[in-house]
Amino acid sequence: MTKNAQSPPPKQVVILAYDQLCTFEFGLSVEIFATPRPEIENWYTCKTIAVEEGPLQAAGGLVVQCDSHIKDIGTADLIIIPGWPTNKKPSDELLVQMLTAHHRGATFMAICSGAFLLAELGLTQDKTITTHWRYIEALKARAPTALVEENVLYCTDNKILSSAGSAAGIDLALHVIRQDFGTNVANIIAQRLVLPAHREGGQRQFVPRPVAQPSKGPLAQLLDHVRTTLDLNWSIKSMAAHAVMSERTLIRRFAQTTGQSPAQWLTTERIYFARELLEKADLSIEHIAARSGFKTPETLRHHFRNKLKISPSDYRRQFNAGTAA
């Protein structure tokens, strides 16, 4: 892939550095965008820019110093925000340079909590964005005019790109490369990183099972009992009978307590349990389907794809390297 003298100049990429820098997000940005790749025509030119006076303290006791000037932000084509402390305020100078870049048509790529800086700059209005599941509610409060997706790996809304957890930033970076250079080049970069070439942005974040809060009463006892007997044929009628209440009352209590219908809650619990078995146990998909109450592998696969946007076998490959589906 030799360079052509008639080709347009490479895109200018800027990676922001700041005090309390997130080193993993920063490292993946540097590895993917700043590594020289002379064999790829018009590969990016990349600078790291300190957005405040240094030296900058990064996670892990590292100190970061940058040579590029903050004014270079204003001329960048792609600006990467490798995380951002959720309560950190941008300086006036950073605000000016970021908005200058925005008006020039720059693309912004926020990794994990980097979306909070975009929200502070007012760049998320009417945009679809995401962040790590731990920060979802805080981002909703910070960006009330944005559509905050709760359970995806990354979002792309015109020039505003955002990823969920740190590693999802790699998926977003490969998406950017795919858009700029095509699938073949994106696959080459993924192979060098020893990563899957493509995970869809709509794939769900794998949020840990919430810890059940101690509670009392017939409904709490019912929920505890059902969680230990998910393989039974639970219905609204059988749940209501076990809790000694009418079906109408059961449905109302479920909505008040869980925000879900009994059927929705039951499916969610079965998925959580199936995930645990896929992560830890060396069981067949058929056995896991039976133990979790889905009965058949086909039903298990249907609900996994519907809720998590991934198959049980692919989930196992990602989270249980010691077994094969």
Image (cartoon, rainbow, N blue to C red):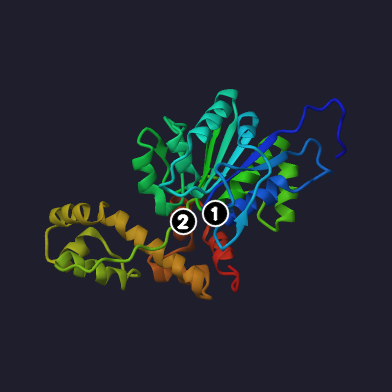
Q: What's the residue at 83%, 43% (across, down)?
A: 38
Q: Secondary structure at mark 2?
A: helix
Q: Which residue is at 37% across, 32% downward?
A: 145
Residue 304's disc is 2
| Residue type, numbered disc 2 | Phe
Q: Residue 315, position in %: x, y?
A: 54, 61
| Residue 262 located left or right of residue 173 | left
Where residue 36 appears, as percent x and y from the top left, is 78, 46
Q: Which of these two is toward me, 141 or 255?
A: 141
Residue 304 image position (x, y, % from top left): 46, 56
State the image coordinates of residue 231 (x, y, percent, origin top left).
35, 70
How much space separates mark 2 and mark 1, taking CA atoms? 32 Å
Q: Quadrant of residue 290?
A: bottom left
Q: Is residue 325 above or below residue 168?
A: below
Q: Which mark is residue 22?
A: 1
Residue 158 in view, yes or no: no
